[in-house]
Image (cartoon, rainbow, N blue to C red):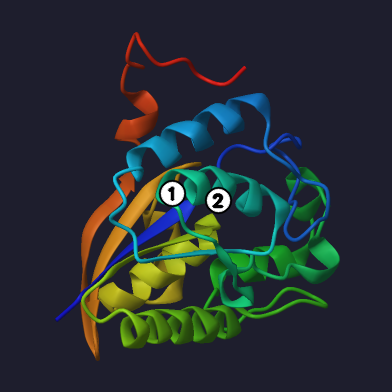
Amino acid sequence: MALTLHLLRHAVHGHPAEMLCGRMAGVGLAAEGERQAARLARRFALGSLDALRTSPVQRCRETAAGLEAACGLAAIVDPAADEVDFGDWTGRRFGDLERDPLWRTWNLDRGHAGAPGGETMARVRARVVALLDELVALHPQGEAAVVTHAEIVRTAVLHVLGLPLQSYDRLEISPASVTTLCLWPGGGRLIGLNDVSHITAPVPTKEVEPA
């Protein structure tokens, strides 16, 4: 018995790429993100999902909306899938953060460092592992999807592979990508990583992308 779990990164948002948005309110999908979300929903439109969860953050909820309609499921908003709480760094530009010694420590020692006024990656890992365990218990032979964030996807993959948090930069997690895990009580394996084939594939001529 095993759960097939798809970890979906939210589609592209409309804020500047050089800004650490974190849990900022009002960060919705860009027009390109809406197109990506529509393609992501089309990929899961066959009705195979038993459960759908989403981060509380707006860009995730907007990405999940298309999946709800395509799969006939109501997404459960789950704080365990939330973005990392970056605390005082939220809304800062990466160029400014590079001059912050704490930011450099964060990137050099993810296993122990934490965001000022926010959370540590060890805390993030704990809530992600708890989410995985809960989904396995609820859907031991099912298929589920979670719309979340790049760091959350990386954390889940590193946990399943038995790798340290500091290996985060070995994993590319693109917007609207699908990363798939096979999970069972006490174990799991990586099935697919950063799959964006639904984004790059040609659109069927009889289908029209949203404006």
Quadrant in which residue 104 is drawn? bottom right
N-term mark: 1 or 2: 2
Q: Relative to 164, does residue 27 appear above or below in the rendering?
A: above
Q: Under tag 1, what secondary structure?
A: loop
Q: Viewer-proximal residue, 208 or 89? A: 208
Q: Position of residue 105 (x, y in %)?
A: 65, 70
Q: Position of residue 40 (x, y in %)?
A: 43, 39
Q: Position of residue 174 (x, y in %)?
A: 46, 42
Q: Amino acid at mark 1?
A: Ile
Apparent side of residue 118 relative to residue 179 in the rendered image (left or right): right
- Residue of label 1: 173
Q: Residue at x 19, y 77 (%)?
A: 2
Q: Viewer-proximal residue, 69 or 110? A: 69
Q: Residue at x 45, y 62 (%)?
A: 153
Q: Relative to 25, does residue 43 appear above or below in the rendering?
A: above
Q: Under tag 2, what secondary structure?
A: helix
- The reply to whether the C-beta atoms of the residues labelled 1 and 2 are less than 8 Å apart is no
Q: Residue at x 33, y 88 (%)?
A: 137
Q: Relative to 74, does residue 18 appear above or below in the rendering?
A: above
Label of residue 56 in the image: none
Mark 2, Cα crowd under 10 Å, few <14 / some 14-19 / many 20+, is many
Apparent side of residue 206 relative to residue 74 in the rendered image (left or right): left
- Residue of label 2: 64
Q: Amino acid at mark 2?
A: Ala
Q: Residue at x 35, y 25 (%)?
A: 200
Q: Viewer-proximal residue, 123 or 96? A: 123
Q: Viewer-proximal residue, 52 or 146? A: 52
Mark 1, Cα crowd under 10 Å, few <14 / some 14-19 / many 20+, is many
Q: Disc 1 versus disc 2: distance between alpha carbons?
A: 17 Å
